[in-house]
Image (tube, helix red, strand yellow):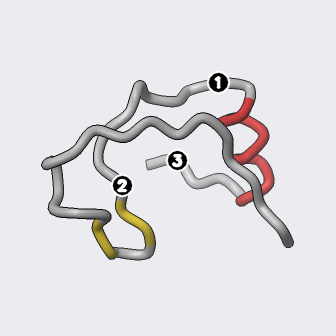
Amino acid sequence: MTKLLTEKFVQKYNKRQGQIEGGSLCFYGHWFGRPHDNYHQLKLVTFDG
């Protein structure tokens, strides 16, 4: 597993480096819906430090 600092993750994701096509969303261990019952695609990631 690769660990990135938040800022580095945001930079890489928005440049479309190493991202996957989409899937289920889980934030801090809480699923948006049930695992694997929906397909979501993030278009942009931001971070306000």
Q: Position of residue 37 (x, y in %)?
A: 14, 49
Q: Position of residue 10 (x, y in %)?
A: 72, 46
- The three-letter code of the residue at mark 1 reads Arg
- The three-letter code of the residue at mark 3 reads Thr
Tell me the CA gap for discs 1 and 2. Answer: 18 Å
State whether residue 31 is above or below residue 40. below
Local SS, label 3: loop
Instruction: State the residue at coordinates (74%, 26%).
Output: 15
State whether residue 16 is above or below residue 26. above
Residue 5 vs residue 36, the one in the foreground: 36
Q: Is residue 44 left or right of residue 26?
A: right
Instruction: State the residue at coordinates (43%, 49%).
Output: 1
As drawn, the label of residue 16 is 1
- The three-letter code of the residue at mark 2 reads Leu
Nearer the viewer's eye, disc 3 or disc 2? 2
As drawn, the label of residue 25 is 2
Q: Which residue is mark 3?
A: 2
Q: Earlier in the sequence, mark 1 or mark 2?
A: 1
Instruction: State the residue at coordinates (58%, 54%).
Output: 3
